[in-house]
Amino acid sequence: MVLPKYDLHCHSTASDGVLSPVELVARAAEQGVEVLAITDHDSIGAIAQAQAPAQAANIRLLPGVELTACWGSRVVHLVGLGFDPAAPSLQRYLDELTVLRLDRAQRIAKKLMGRRLPDLLPAVLELAGDGQVGRPHFAMALVAAGVCETEQQAFKNYLGTGKVGDVKMDWPAMSEALALLHGIGGLGILAHPTKYRLTFSRLRSLLTDFVNAGGDGVEVSYAGIKPEHQRELQKIARKMDLMVSAGSDFHQPGRPWVELGRFLPLDTECRHVLTSLL
Ligand code: AMP
Ligand code: FE
Ligand code: FE
Ligand code: ZN
């Protein structure tokens, strides 16, 4: 099967992306993307808005989401693809995540105030608009308030792993997220496996648990992954009989190394998720 040009992981203003769903589709069209999944953090708010422009641009829009989940004490991201976006169980599940995210935002704001910073919550909620609120909105607010020079620095000093704004949350378990996706006819893909700061040996045990919980595939190509890690992941995917997926994880323009439609798996021996989605 010759695969079309695709992107199966990107973000809009329905979560922490900068482009609206309509702008994101326009950019995908400019980049020649033919199959697109918008995978906002714990939100499918982009799908309804993207449908008409995608159709007009001859882009096949696949239902997508990036679910926040727990693997033990770790947070992992699961990309869900090809599910029924109208399923009531999905809406209930996402509503719970919205509550968790609002609760976390309040807690992060309090923690930062404990560091003698101003109350950033109003600005953060304004930045998030009607999308899911996330740490990147805090990063933007910290820059806007002149506390940090860049969003990267905001993560390094306040929001990243182990920092004051990294508050522990009881996200749903990875197995729950996978069960939800399967219950609504979707596939569950482990997002950007090398971004969890795990050794490859721990990563193998994550992937083993993921497979045992019914996981369907793993991303092997995305912005920032090293070629040797991509090869290793493809080898693991073949061994564990996992499908492979890829996407830019695009959040905003102005970063030429993270462009829509540029990340395609190379290993033709791996089964691609698109073969079961198209
Ligand atoms: P959240 O889901 O609210 O915890 O935010 C996770 C998002 O924050 C990721 O999807 C990235 O967009 C962003 N992010 C996480 N870590 C960093 C970092 N070190 N620097 C910049 N952005 C980051
Ligand atoms: Fe993000
Ligand atoms: Fe992610
Ligand atoms: Zn993402």
Image: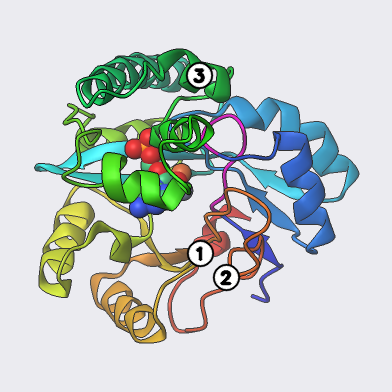
Residue matched to label 2: 263
Residue 15 falls within the magenta-colored stretch: yes
Q: Callout 3: helix, strand or loop?
A: helix
The answer for how far apart the CA atoms under marks 1 and 2 are is: 6 Å
Side of 192 where 264 appears, left or right: right
Residue matched to label 1: 246
Percent from the top left, x then y, of residue 161?
A: 21, 47
Residue type at tag 2: Phe
> Tags 1 and 2 in contact by the CB under 8 Å rule?
yes
Residue type at tag 3: Ala
Q: Mark 3 against mark 2, which lies toward the viewer?
A: 3
The colour mode here is rainbow
Percent from the top left, x then y, of residue 190?
A: 34, 54
Residue matched to label 3: 123
Q: Residue at x 26, y 76 (%)?
A: 236
The magenta segment is: 9-16
Secondary structure mostly seen in the magenta stretch: loop
Up-down: is 226 above or below 256?
below
Q: Is the C-beta of the residue carrying label 3 under 8 Å from the nearest atom of ligand 1?
A: no
